[in-house]
Image (spheres, rainbow, N blue to C red):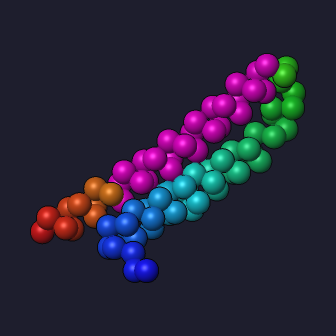
């Protein structure tokens, strides 16, 4: 079974954006804010974790959009 070029390109952009960008951002922000979060009340800790998850998701999504737009631009030339 051979993957088409479009499907392979989609998988590569998805892998790069989520595993190589979003996951390290999530882990890094979690580590950097660990001690600071522990000093907050429990409800505020949850809000900070949600904001960290949102930031990592936005980073991954942004990279995914950039990769897809450059692929479309390359294909149109």
Q: Residue furthest front?
A: 1
Q: Residue furthest left?
A: 77
Left or right position of 23 against 33: left
In percent of width and height, residue 13 lies at 43, 62
Residue shown at the point (32%, 67%) measured from the top left:
6
Above or below, 29 against 43 in this view is below
Specify the segment rendered in magenta: 43-67
Image-quadrant location for residue 30 = top right
Q: Quadrant of the N terminus?
A: bottom left
Residue shown at the point (81%, 40%) measured from the top left:
34
Q: Quadrant of the C terminus?
A: bottom left
Secondary structure mostly taken by the magenta-highlighted segment of the chain: helix
In percent of width and height, residue 43 lies at 79, 19
Reply yes or no: does residue 77 show up in magenta: no
In percent of width and height, residue 39 lies at 87, 27
Above or below, 74 against 27 in this view is below
Above or below, 33 against 69 in this view is above
Left or right position of 23 against 41: left
Above or below, 60 against 45 in this view is below
Depth check, front residue: 34 or 8: 8
Number of labelled discs?
A: 0
Depth check, front residue: 36 or 1: 1
Depth check, front residue: 1 or 28: 1
Residue shown at the point (28%, 56%) measured from the top left:
69
Reply yes or no: does residue 57 show up in magenta: yes
Left or right position of 32 against 52: right
Residue shown at the point (50%, 41%) measured from the top left:
58
Q: Residue furthest bottom?
A: 1
Image-quadrant location for residue 11 = bottom left
């Amino acid at each position: 079974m051979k993957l088409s070029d479009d499907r392979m390109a989609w998988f590569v952009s998805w892998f790069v954006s989520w595993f190589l960008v979003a996951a390290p951002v999530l882990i890094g922000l979690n580590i950097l804010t660990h001690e600071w979060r522990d000093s907050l009340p429990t409800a505020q800790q949850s809000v900070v974790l949600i904001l960290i998850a949102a930031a990592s998701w936005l980073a991954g999504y942004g990279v995914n959009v950039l990769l897809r737009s450059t692929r479309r631009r390359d294909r149109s030339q």
